[in-house]
Image: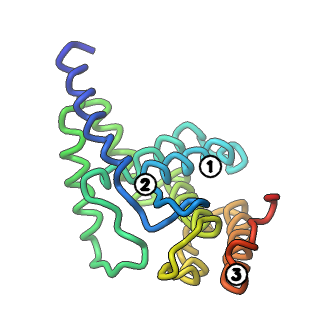
Amino acid sequence: MDDDEIGGTLAFLALAERLKDTLRTGRTATGRVESTAEHSWRLCLMALVLGESLGVDSGRLIRICLVHDLAEALTGDLPAPAPRRAGVKEAREREALGTLTMTLPSAPRAAIFALWEEYETGSTPEGRLARGLDKLETILQHAQGKNPPELDLAYNLDYGRKDTDAHPLLAAIRARLDAATRARLTADEDAVTLPGTP
């Protein structure tokens, strides 16, 4: 890597830092609004601990998860329940990803785009599983977070079902998270814990 490539890589990393300030609708267990970077971190952690059991290339799965929301550093997060027109979000994110990565050397830039496309299209087992894990991470956060009253927790009971049904392990995790969501809907949120937690 020459000096120009180092400079371009640092410029990319500086711009990607905005993901730390890109806020989502989810809240942490203490009630603090989570960032897209935090969501992506736990999604990657899920891919790391579940990848082998899912029977795929764990490294590739983690890389897909790492870049899946990278464009949101420039576009911001669009909550799942928000109205959408077909293809608009993807086009905006593709353009933002181009802007975000334009200073990178060609090989890592192409790799990021290929991984992002794999997620968007679900064209590989890793891409499909990343989509399912992404939905599960969001549902997990809503199930354990101290959410504002306007958050429609019931939305999660149908959210991303096609993606989370893509593998028996994802479906099993989904069943536990749905049970936790139902418990949150019918009880005092501070009195409910996730299955398997103290």
Q: Using the image as rendered, state which of residue 65 and residue 76 is in the foreground.
A: 76
Q: Is residue 108 above or below residue 174?
A: above
Q: Residue furthest top?
A: 2
Identified at 73% across, 83% down, the residue is 187
Residue in the foreground of this view, choosing between 133 and 114:
133
- The answer for how far apart the CA atoms under marks 3 and 2 are is 25 Å
Query: Counting other residues with Cα less than 10 Å from the Cα at mark 3, is it few (<14), some (14-19), or many (20 or more)?
Result: some
Residue at the location (45% across, 44% down)? 66
**In terms of image quadrants, where is residue 7?**
top left
Q: Is residue 186 above or below residue 16?
A: below
The residue mark sitting in front, 1 or 2, is 2
Locate residue 36, reporting x and y percent. Answer: 42, 54
Vertical order, 16 against 154 (above or below): above
Query: Of the residues shown, which amino acid type is indicated by label 3?
Result: Arg
Residue at 72% across, 48% down: 53
Instruction: Say left or right for 96 vs 164.
Output: left
SS state under label 3 = helix
Mark 1 vs mark 2, CA separation in Å: 17 Å
Q: Measured from the top left, where is residue 124 in percent x and y?
A: 50, 53
Quadrant including the C terminus: bottom right
Colour setup of the view: rainbow
Query: Viewed as shown, does residue 168 lie left or right of 93?
Result: right
Q: Position of residue 28 (x, y in %)?
A: 56, 59
Which of the two labelled residues, at mark 1 and mark 3, occupies the earlier sequence position?
1
Q: Quadrant of residue 17?
A: top left
Q: Quadrant of the N terminus?
A: top left
Q: Earlier in the sequence, mark 3 or mark 2?
A: 2
Q: Amino acid at mark 2?
A: Ser
Query: Label 3: which residue?
Result: 182
Residue 48 falls left or right of residue 17: right
The circle on residue 35 is 2
Which label was assigned to residue 46?
1
